[in-house]
Image: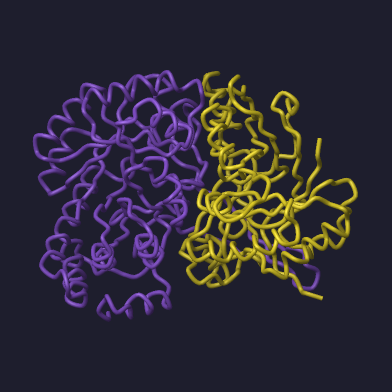
Chain colours: A yellow, B purple
Amino acid sequence: MEQAFFVSQVELLEDFNPSPYDRMYFGIEFCQHLIPSSRELGEAMDYAEQHNLKFTFVTPYVTDAFLEKFKELFKSIEKRKPDAEIVVNDWGILRMLNSNFSFPAYTLGRLMNKMKRDPRIAAFMDKMPPEIIANFRDTHLSIAAIRNFLKKFKINRLEFDNLLQGIAFNVEETAPEMHISIYYPFGYITTTRLCKISEIEKDGTFVVRCILKCPRTCRNYRAIFTNDVMKVPIAAQGNTFFFKNEKLPENLNDLGVDRLIFQPEIPMPIALERK
Amino acid sequence: MKIIAPIASIMELRTMIEYGVDEVYCGFQFHSDHQSILVNRRPNVSANLKNIEELHDAVEIAHSKGAKLSITINSLYYTKNQYSYIVKMVEAAITAGVNAVIVSDLALILFLRENYPDLRLHLSTTSSVFNSESIKFFEELGLKRIILPRHLTIGEILKIKEKSTIDLEVFIFGQRCMNDDGQCTWEHGLENFAGEGIYSGTGCYMNYKFKAFAKNSKTNSLKSLERNYTMEWLAPRYCGFCPLFDFVKAGIKYFKIPGREEMSPQHRIEWAKAVNGIRKILENFPDDRDKYHTIAKEFYKQFFKSSCFKTHCYYPAWEEEERELWNKPSLSPR
């Protein structure tokens, strides 16, 4: 089992011991405004090299303006680490990578895996019919047609959140093999371009409004939401809500999981004093 | 300019067509079992035609009035177990004569393209197509129309249109989910199988207690803020009348009213009537943006008995983006 860790900022690794890990994930999945600069990307690759870690760059969903920015970042990775792994969470990025770059393989990120993360599912499982529970644990990524299609785009790894309701799927016999990763302990529930936390400072009101001009409020605040129905707390940082599940599935081998991705923090950048 | 509106009953269909709607979309309940609930992104009974017979009637009425009808099979994903059910549902819809199926799941798209190559597919907003490369990705898969996400700016939509040849559909009036449809994993229909005790609706509408934590810049730790917070949720009525001028000029033809499950049929019908009204105004001022904007705002005020305000624009624009947009040689200044 390969062990990886995932951070959005190299600075957070100051007191982190990377020795138990084989691979470093670096980047951002949820907001294009938070993508690393080429300097930060360079520092992350430096860290990986210094600690003898394999390197994975994680990308979010993007608009046209940011496709171009990613082209530049991919060029710098290709030059320095042609065997780096890229996690895609946007079909356009996947198409652009296949048309313009020659990385050996790509990974389909957890935003592309549409399984339900609503914490109420786990809270109410005792009331649900078995076929519905099975559906909430299953995925479309076990279907042969989609796996064959993804292979054409050089996808060889599929990524999952550590769902509160559990994961259970049987891959179709004719489907090609894929590597499988699981992120833990944080899983995402929902995300948006209408940033929920962006106006928290104004008047004590937590306003839902579009952040066309991103004030980077997410770097300074986090909120914990609780609700008696939900059973587990939900953490909000910036534009994304997360649940936490530290208990890994017992059926990792059955699922074909060959990589665990540990997130020491919610994978969103926070404001740090640079030294 | 074509207006596309949701329906959940024959009565609503007839009224929508009367108010100038060109296309309607709907879900339908094929069986009353649990599998049918999960097939639909808006699973509750009130958001769907009751059965296949009602779908047949709806198609017949729509076609007799020159309108088109699409069905939604637009859940974000389907599992293998659901396919035998979906096949029956799709074949019943084809027999009923629907014009298109609105889809999202890539595996389902591949399945339908292989098995029903003549079936017209429209890509749901739940596919989160935020850029022109994604448009190409789905165009190459044989999709005929793409419904863009709600969370794009005016400039981003126009940029996508500039780089695309496929038909695009954009939201024009009504509710706007605060989460991106394609990246949101709340389950909309949990109360259908979990029974009482669970909140009826999506997780984003629930009441929460919450604590905010602010970062302490000296220690980099998060410190609890001793303040009470409230959450402002959705406004029911977001408006895209102003950018309509530029969308139509840019060649976008299809304008969608959302809300199969939200609000009442009366609200949806009122919105369709308003969009039809704004279409007539645009037809009268196809080349004069200033005049169109002035009259559109006056129309809004008269129709809804209140002035419009910027926080309820369906597509806010950056100030810089707006400046660039309005200064384009092909567009007259605002």
Residue drawn where x is 29% and y is 62% of the image: B240
In the drawing, does residue A272 fall left or right of residue B287?
Answer: right
Determine which quarter of the picture holds residue A50.
bottom right
Q: Which of the two residues, A207 or A198, is positioned nearer the viewer here?
A: A198
| Residue B216 in the figure: left or right of residue A136 | right
* Residue A166 image offset from top left, x and y in percent: 65, 30
Q: Give coordinates of residue B76: x percent, y percent.
A: 47, 38
Q: Residue at x 33, y 30 (%)?
A: B45
Q: As displayed, is residue B306 above or below residue B73?
A: below
- Depicted A66 relative to depicted A129: above or below: below
Depth order, front residue of A244/A248: A248
Q: Is residue B227 above or below residue B234?
A: below
Residue positioned 79% across, 46% down in the render: A4
Q: Is residue B285 left or right of residue A63?
A: left
Any part of residue A229 in sight: no
Quadrant of the rendered image containing residue B176: bottom left
Query: Residue B95: where, in percent of width, then height?
Result: 23, 22
